[in-house]
Image: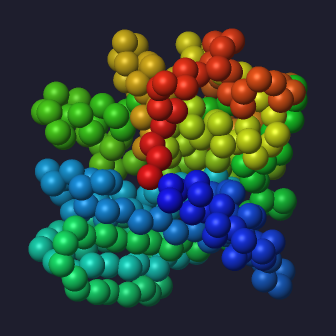
Amino acid sequence: MGEADFIAALSALAPHPAARGLADDAAVLAVGNETLVLTADTMVEGTHWPAQQSLADVAWKLVAVNLSDLAAKGAEPVGILLSYMLGEGDKVFLEGLHEALDTFGVPLLGGDTVRASGARSFSVTAIGRATHTPVPARSGASPGDGLFLCGSIGGAMMGFEAITTDSGADISPFTRPTPLLAEGRALAPHVTAMMDVSDGLLLDAWRMAEASGATLEIDSGAVPLGAPEDRRADALRWGDDYALLFASPAERTLPVAATRIGTVVERGAAPVMLDGKPPKQSESLGYRH
């Protein structure tokens, strides 16, 4: 069973409105006068980080990718819960975790530890407080909206290659990404749809389009790159950059720097049109489990 099929089956078990049909970056739960935003992400050795990568960087990234989901909802972090598999390098992991919590001003509230054999995996659940309601969703992009990217793509791809091939590129976009928390909070009142780019710009745009029942027309040449120009096609599909992809009325003045990369139009032949044509089905749109 593939990821999409499994999530579709799970959605039948998650009828609560807070779950958003399991089709968003996070759950959105109204509690009294507050709206909480909750998300969870897991990283697995050999899949999400190579053997050469420091566990301090793994800890940082584990926190950052969860906070990026909160950023996509315009939420303010409240704290995290950590699920940790004990093993070699625990002290190094703790050093990186301390750095991340201190840098992002997020408290550790609890979690769980286990010991087992095989590839290690770590999980974080992040809890946030909505700063604007309605909380942005992947759905909501409307024909006539502009499509924008806050941040750039391709830097993580180059960082990964630097770790695995010693290319000399900056590894930090892959090892220590920065969640765009302030930008997400500023954008929340101005967007019709928003999500972070974790699995590849084309794949995540496809998901936004499907959720919104629209087509996203993307001008590939307008997409800001953190990679050489000759790697543009790869960068569109690589992921792990944690930029914010959002739709907003084209005439609206935005409160943060962002690049317009396309337009939302009525649903057409495909959810995403890249330079006027559907992406080639023979090519991956991004990372799938």
Residue 273, horizontal then vertical, whole percent: 68, 21
Left or right of 32, for residue 55: left
- Front residue of 38 and 117: 117
Would you say 9 lies left or right of 3 here?
Answer: right
The residue sitting at 47% across, 26% down in the picture is 283
Q: Nearer the viewer, residue 102 or 288?
A: 288
Residue 134: in sight, yes or no? yes
Number of callouts in the render? 0
**In the depicted view, which residue is nearer to us: 270 or 127?**
270
Q: Using the rendered view, name the quadrant where residue 35 is placed.
A: bottom right
Residue 21 at x, y percent in the picture: 74, 64
On screen, residue 217 above or below 65: above
Q: Is residue 264 visible?
A: no
Residue 64 placed where, x, y %? Answer: 44, 58
Residue pictured at 82% horizontal, 40% vertical: 213
Residue 68 lies, with reference to residue 227, above or below; the image says below
Residue, x 14% and y 71% (percent of image)? 89
Q: Position of residue 45 (x, y in %)?
A: 25, 61
Q: Residue furthest front?
A: 1
Question: What residue do we see at 62% from left, 32% from top?
Answer: 149
